[in-house]
Each structure stands twice: as structure tokens, then as C-alpha cells.
């Protein structure tokens, strides 16, 4: 695409504002890929893009640049400059190449517009773009990470169906011939167009894995500390009767955020990275076995369990004989079910391709019960998107994607305030006197006790 700008007066913060829209393969409906920008003028004083309209002396921002594509719509309000974009989450690896050149001039030194040239000379105003591989585009605004380099290497090995096959699928979905498709009319880029579902941004790659974090137990009534055993199911080997030694498909969370309160008991463990697990079936999930440490009794007791789906499937490579797996990334609010894990439920999860349906049926049959309105807040993120979902659940409420309709009113996250008799108890207040002021040592103690309780 080529555009010409002939401006007599300029706003120093003027920029190119780019919106990229496509057809979302998961819904066959329009979706916004992301947004990008390019500042058109530089502050002549400091060589930076002009940040305010008060800048008096500017220079055109000339050159060839690789610009990031952001996965969020910037606030469209004045002043609308480049700073609206720089703190937004990026679409990993995605970028747009932008060239801004000075208009050619005639013999009298006046700028020449393409529109003023005769038809047989219009081509003279076009300068052929260099090949990307020549490395001539500046990456001043686009710093690629080492993970992104790995992702691009992996992507080159994967099937890349031609656009014609994608268009054919689109036509079939709409009951028409591919020759009848008018893509420019199908692709809508209004402000109501939803963002592309980045769950399907890149296929699951076992070598890069999934990052998991137990954020908190919310609307909890018990006063104590939590230990969570997270198992990949299948295989879910911790629950095998013939298991020997510690399971290699499970990991624990025990480190409390002592500044949080018991009603929303937070963890400060950081991410656990699940590496090397090849998908065994579409229903692969995380089984969360939640246990409670009672400080006054000095023991762990069964508390409840929850299930977090790990993978989803989508046909994307024009080969309907194979499944393409994608990580169901996000921060989710999940209902907690009462008591110790039911061996029958675990076995059904191992065999099922729809783990949430297993819970739905068990709840209907009353073989499991919800633990009141308590929920566990979990972050599951494809490592290929590890720079996403960094805001805390207090800043950006967890997704309700896996809640049933009847659970939306009870398990959608809402901050809890103090009750009639004062505020909730800080976890720090529950630490035994022996460990007062020694929270790190107490966290180590809890981890040791939890491993002993689990016999791992």
C-alpha cells in the first residue's frame, strides 16, 4: 500500500494508526489482529518522537522501520501520540514493515505527487521495497526476544496452508462458491469488531511448554495455609496405585503471600513451567488437589479440588486427519469442589476429551459438591505468550470462560471487603509465634510438611 501526505500544517504528535483485521478461523467471523503505529514527526531537539502538541520544531520521521503489532486497542483520546501504544501487550513475533520517504521533486525543486504524473510515468514515483532478509529495516521500535526467535523457527517447520484453501473453507461455511467471496466486505474493522482469539496464535509446542501459576483461593472461609498439587491429566500418575517415587507430571504450590488475607489467600510461588508433555488427547487438563494446613493442629487436611483445561483443538493446517493443539491461555476463576479427589472422577478425566463435561455430569449426579462460593484463580499461559496476562487478577478480573451459567453469579471474581465485625485476617497473623518475623522459614516449613503429607 502507498499513501501520499501533503500537509501545510502539522500536529507534531501525528502518526500512522494502523488496524489489522482478518477472519478468525475459530469463529469464521471478523476479528482484529491488533494495532500498530508510526510517529510521523521527530522532536528536532532530542531526536525522539514528538510527545506533545507543544513541540515547536519537528522533522519528518524518514526511513524504513519494523513496527510491533499490539494486542489491545489504545485509548482514542487526546493527546493521541505514540505513548498510547508503547505499554500495550504485543502480538508475539508479529510486526509490520513501514517505509516513509520524502516525495520526489521536479526540476524546480517542488514536490511531485503521483496524481500529477501522466499515466506512463506514475511508476517512476514507486521505489521498490527491499527484501526483509536484507536487514535494512530498523528494529528501533521492535525488540524481538529469544523466545520469539524460537517460535519463528518452529513456525517455519509447520504446515502453512495456502490462502486459497482458507478462502475455500470460509466459502463452505457460508454456503457459497469461493468465487463469490468478497473478502473486503467480510472483513469488518469497526470498533465493535472483537479481538482475534490469541488462544490460536500458535500451536502448542512441548519444547516451550506452558506456564502455570495458582494465583489465589478466593472467598475462602477457613483460616490456614494452602498447599496445591497440580497434576497434568492424563497421565495423572500421582493417583496411580502402582506409582513409585515422586510423579514427574505434577508440581506443588505452597508459598503464601503473607500480606494477603485468608478470604483471598494468595500465593507468591511464581510460575511453574510444564515442559515436554506431548498431547495425548484433546481433554488434557490440570487437576488441582487443594489441601489446607491448620496452624493450631499442625497438619494438612483435604480441602477440595478443581480442574483447569490445558489444550484446545482447531483445524488450521488443511489436513483434517490430524489435530492441531493450542494452549487455552488466560487467568481463570474455577469453582472448587468439596473434599478429597474422587478416584472415579480422576479416571474419567484421564479418559475424557471434555474434562468440564465430566465435572458437569458429576455435579448433576451429586457425586461431587461445590465448596460453597469458593473459587481458585489460576493463570495458564502458553510460554509463546508469556508476556501476556501479567496484570494481577485485582487489576483485570479473571475470565469466567469455564463457569457454568448457574456459577456466574457465585464464582465471578469480586473483591471482598471487611464484614460486620471487621476486616479479614492477614495470613501473617496466622503464623505461629515461633516463626513471627521469619516468614521465609515458615514458607520452607510448609513446603516440607506438604511433601510429607503427599508422600512425595
Image (spheres, helix red, strand yellow):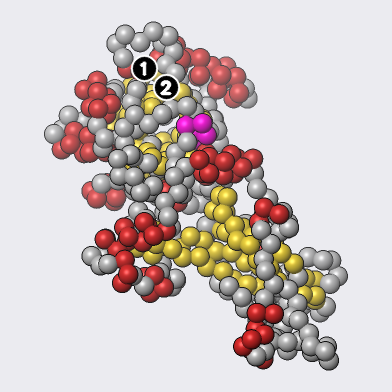
Residue 29 vertical placement versus 112 (above, below) = above
Range shown magenta? 206-211
Q: Quadrant of residue 3?
A: bottom right
**Identity of the residue drawn at 24% across and 20% down:** 343
Q: Residues within 10 Å of mark 2 (few under 14, many from 20)?
A: some
**Identity of the residue drawn at 15% across and 33% down:** 366
Residue under numbered circle 1: 238
In the structure shown, which secondary structural element does the residue marked by tag 2 occupy? loop
Residue 132 in view? yes
Q: Nearer the viewer, residue 443 or 22?
A: 22
Label 1 or label 2, whichever lies nearer to me, is 2
Do callouts 1 and 2 mark residues in contact (Cβ within 8 Å)?
yes
User: Left or right of 401: which side holds 293?
Assistant: right
Determine if the magenta segment contains residue 215.
Answer: no
**Identity of the residue drawn at 50% across and 19% down:** 446
The x and y percentages for residue 346 are: 27, 24
Residue under numbered circle 2: 249
Q: Quadrant of residue 309?
A: top left
Amino acid at each position: 500500500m502507498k499513501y501520499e501526505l501533503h500537509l501545510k500544517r502539522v500536529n507534531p504528535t501525528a502518526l500512522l494508526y494502523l488496524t489489522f483485521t482478518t477472519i478468525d478461523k475459530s469463529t469464521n467471523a471478523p476479528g482484529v489482529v491488533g494495532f500498530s503505529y508510526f510517529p510521523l514527526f521527530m522532536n528536532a531537539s532530542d531526536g525522539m518522537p514528538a510527545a506533545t502538541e507543544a513541540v515547536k520544531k519537528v522533522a519528518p520521521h524518514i526511513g524504513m522501520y519494523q513496527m510491533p503489532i499490539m494486542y489491545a486497542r489504545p485509548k482514542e483520546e487526546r493527546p493521541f501520540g505514540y505513548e498510547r501504544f508503547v505499554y500495550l501487550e504485543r502480538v508475539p513475533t508479529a510486526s509490520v514493515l513501514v517505509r516513509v520517504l520524502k516525495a520526489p521533486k521536479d526540476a524546480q525543486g517542488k514536490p511531485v505527487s503521483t496524481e500529477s504524473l501522466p499515466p506512463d510515468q506514475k511508476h517512476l514515483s514507486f521505489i521498490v521495497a527491499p527484501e526483509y532478509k536484507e536487514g535494512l529495516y530498523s528494529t528501533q521500535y521492535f525488540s524481538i526476544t529469544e523466545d520469539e526467535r524460537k517460535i519463528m523457527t518452529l513456525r517455519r517447520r509447520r504446515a502453512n496452508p495456502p490462502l486459497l484453501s482458507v478462502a475455500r473453507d470460509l466459502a463452505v461455511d457460508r454456503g457459497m462458491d469461493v468465487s463469490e467471496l468478497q473478502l473486503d466486505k467480510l472483513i469488518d474493522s469497526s470498533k465493535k469488531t472483537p479481538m482475534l482469539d490469541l488462544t490460536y496464535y500458535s500451536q502448542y509446542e512441548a519444547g516451550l511448554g506452558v506456564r502455570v501459576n495458582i494465583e489465589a483461593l478466593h472467598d475462602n472461609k477457613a483460616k490456614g495455609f494452602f498447599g496445591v498439587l497440580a497434576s497434568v491429566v492424563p497421565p495423572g500418575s500421582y493417583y496411580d496405585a502402582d506409582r513409585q517415587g515422586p510423579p514427574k507430571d505434577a508440581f506443588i504450590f505452597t508459598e503464601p503471600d503473607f500480606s494477603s488475607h485468608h478470604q483471598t489467600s494468595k500465593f507468591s510461588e511464581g510460575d511453574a513451567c510444564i515442559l515436554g508433555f506431548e498431547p495425548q488427547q484433546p481433554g488434557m487438563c490440570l487437576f488441582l488437589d487443594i489441601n489446607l494446613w491448620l496452624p493450631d493442629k499442625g497438619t494438612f487436611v483435604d480441602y477440595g479440588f478443581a480442574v483447569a483445561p490445558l489444550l484446545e483443538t482447531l483445524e488450521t493446517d488443511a489436513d483434517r486427519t490430524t489435530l492441531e493443539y493450542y494452549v487455552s491461555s488466560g487467568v481463570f476463576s474455577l469453582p472448587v469442589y468439596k473434599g478429597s479427589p474422587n478416584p472415579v472422577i480422576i479416571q474419567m478425566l484421564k479418559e475424557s476429551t471434555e474434562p468440564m463435561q465430566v465435572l458437569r455430569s458429576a455435579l448433576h449426579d451429586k457425586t461431587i459438591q461445590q465448596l460453597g462460593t469458593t473459587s481458585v484463580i489460576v493463570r495458564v499461559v502458553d510460554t509463546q505468550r508469556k508476556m501476556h496476562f501479567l496484570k494481577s487478577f485485582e487489576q483485570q478480573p479473571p475470565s469466567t470462560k469455564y463457569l457454568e451459567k448457574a456459577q456466574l453469579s457465585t464464582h465471578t471474581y469480586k473483591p471482598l471487603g471487611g464484614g460486620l465485625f471487621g476486616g479479614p485476617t492477614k495470613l501473617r497473623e496466622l503464623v505461629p509465634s515461633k516463626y513471627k518475623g521469619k516468614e521465609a522459614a515458615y514458607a520452607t516449613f510448609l513446603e516440607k510438611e506438604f511433601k510429607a503429607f503427599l508422600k512425595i
